Image (cartoon, rainbow, N blue to C red):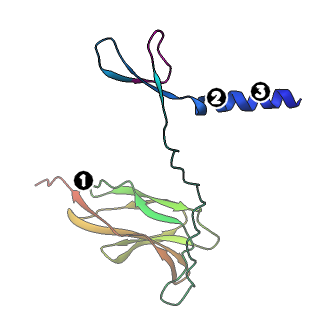
Amino acid sequence: MRPLLMLMLLASAAPAMAGIYKYIDAQGNTAYSNQPPDGVVAQPVELPPLNSVESQAPAAPPIAPVTEEQPRSAYEVLEVTNLPSSEALRANNGTFTVGVLIKPRLQGPHLFRLLLDDQPYGQPSNVPSLQLVNIDRGTHSLAVQVISGDSIVQQSPTVTFTVQRVHTP
C-alpha cells in the first residue's frame, strides 16, 4: 500500500516540479519552454518560489443590538413588483395589478396594505397580488406595508411610476 501511495503523491507533484528551460532557437532568438528541445543546449531557469496566500474564512459581520431606532425586520425581502421602471404604465381605465415579493412568506395575522401617494389604499389583504382601480394619469408613488392590526410591522421601499391613460372626449 505504501509504494502505491508514494507513486500517487509523486504523480500529483510532477506538474508542480516541471521546469522552465532557456535556449537559443534556430533564428538566434532567446526562447523559453517547459521541455528542453531536442538537439539544442538548454539551460534550466531557476524561478523564485510562488507567492501564496492562505484563504481565510470571511469574518462574520458584527451583530448590531436591536434598539428603538433600529427595529429588526420581520421579512428579509419586501417589495412591490410588476411596475415598469423605465416607461409609463399603460392603463387606459386606470386599473392595474401589482405584486408583492416577500421572503419569508407572510406570517400569521399579518396583512398587506398598499400606500398610494403616501396614503393607505384599498382593504388590507393576505394575497400578494393587489389591484388598483381608476388611478389618475400622472406620476404616483407606491409602497406596501405589512400590518398587524393597527401596527405597521414593515414597509417596502417606495416605487415611483407614471400612469398613462388615453383621454377620450
- The span shown in magenta is 32-41
Q: Is residue 39 magenta?
A: yes
The spot of residue 22 in percent (x, y) is: 42, 25
The spot of residue 82 in percent (x, y) is: 38, 53
Instruction: Sort mark 3 into few (<14), some (14-19) or many (20+) by Cα contacts within 10 Å.
Output: few
Decide if residue 90 is on the left or right side of residue 146. left
**Any mark on residue 56, and which?**
none
The residue beneath circle 1 is 86
**Mark before the other along the chain sequence, 2 or 3:** 3
**Any mark on residue 7, and which?**
3
The kind of residue tagged 2 is: Ala
Q: Nearer the viewer, residue 17 or 109?
A: 17
**Mark before the other along the chain sequence, 2 or 1:** 2
Asked if the residues shown at circle 2 and circle 3 are in contact, with their CB atoms under 8 angstroms apart, the answer is no
Q: Nearer the viewer, residue 119 or 83?
A: 83
Asked if the residues shown at circle 3 and circle 1 are in contact, with their CB atoms under 8 angstroms apart, the answer is no
Whole-Å distance between the Cαs marked 3 and 1? 63 Å
Decide if residue 63 is on the left or right side of residue 22. right
Q: Is residue 87 magenta?
A: no
The spot of residue 75 in percent (x, y) is: 55, 69
**Mark before the other along the chain sequence, 3 or 1:** 3
Instruction: Name the magenta segment's main secondary structure.
Output: loop
The kind of residue tagged 1 is: Ser
The kind of residue tagged 3 is: Leu
Residue lying at the far left of the rendered structure: 169
The residue beneath circle 2 is 14
Residue lying at the far top of the rendered structure: 39
SS category of the residue bearing label 3: helix
141 in relation to 8, above or below? below
x 29%, y 62%: residue: 134
Tag nearer the camera, 2 or 1: 2
